[in-house]
Image (cartoon, helix red, strand yellow):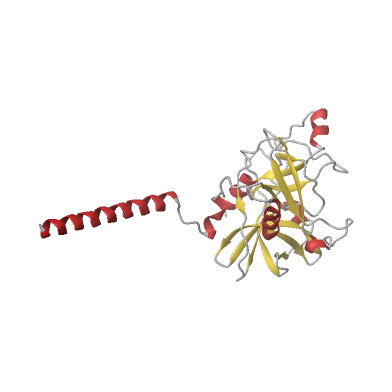
Amino acid sequence: MAAAGKYQGLKLMGMRSLFLIVSLGVILVGEPAITPEANMSVRQGSHQLEAADLEKLARSIAVKVRSHQGFLGSGILIRKQGKIYTVVTNDHVLIAGDPPYQIETPDGKIYPAQQIQETKKVQPTERVNDLGLLQFRSLANYTIATLGSASTLAVGESVLAAGFPLMNGGTNPAPNLRGFVSNRGEISWVLDKALEGGYRIGYTNGIQKGMSGGPLLNVRGEVVAINGMHAEPLWGNPYIYQDGSTPSLSLREKMSQYSWGIPVETVVQITNNK
């Protein structure tokens, strides 16, 4: 009887161990570890952030792009590999100044940066995307943006645009919050095909000069597009499709009412090639 009792006890312990192993297995499969290097392809889920938390997050991932000529525009921290950080910005931000470039991080530190991505064509027949990549080295621990998906955006969806606007068209960002500005709006248009520069996402948020290269975030705190084109341009006609065709006059007039961004998928595409 004692042996039988001991056997039953061992059997029960074995079953408990098996249950624990199976349970852990489910946890490990269902909740894989997330590393900083994998952060580009990880989404935060359906949780919506409070307005203050969303602005705080935007401020933590937005940087200033500089050169010896001064402030050029905004950028986003999108990847960390060891001590190397990668920043995405607009190509027209980089063209506005001469290298060597610099990155000013949210804590006010300035690092020398190297351009690693020349703007490339997605397809041979298409014109270039208005994106560029910079890298800098730091021992500090900065927040890396979580990249979402622009393909799931719906008209009317709430978004937050952020960056560092120039003050009165000068060379220095506005003084408040180290120049950082964020504002809410909503998705107004998702084009079937991209405009020159890769612009496809239209939204009602006000974008000012200097905010180019800054993030457009959804309510979950995911970057869904890169700011780059403000409403009511003063000169030129930016509303030309990448294939060289031109929207009708009525469509161009409608397009000019909105700010425009480049889908985050384009950022992932060029970054994965590096």
Q: Is residue 48 left or right of residue 64?
A: left
* Image coords of residue 168 (percent x, y): 89, 56
Q: Residue at horizontal 18%, vertical 54%?
A: 8
Looking at the image, which residue is at 20% across and 54% down?
11
Up-down relation of residue 238 to residue 139 (above or below): above
Quadrant in which residue 265 is drawn: top right
Residue furthest toward the right?
Answer: 168
Q: At x 62% / y 70%, what residue is drawn?
A: 140
Farthest front residue in view: 1
Position of the N terminus, as image quadrant, is bottom left
Residue 108 location (% of width, % of height) = 73, 68
Q: Nearer the viewer, residue 75 or 34?
A: 34
Frontmost residue, 268 versus 206: 206
Q: Position of residue 164 (x, y in %)?
A: 78, 57
Residue at image point 80% right, 60% down: 179
Instruction: Locate residue 172: give its quadrant.
Output: bottom right
- Considering the image in quadrants, where does the C terminus appear? bottom right
Displayed quadrant of residue 111: bottom right
Image x and y of residue 89, in percent: 70, 54
Q: Is residue 128 visible?
A: no
Count of numbered marks: 0
**Residue 24 visible in rendering:** yes
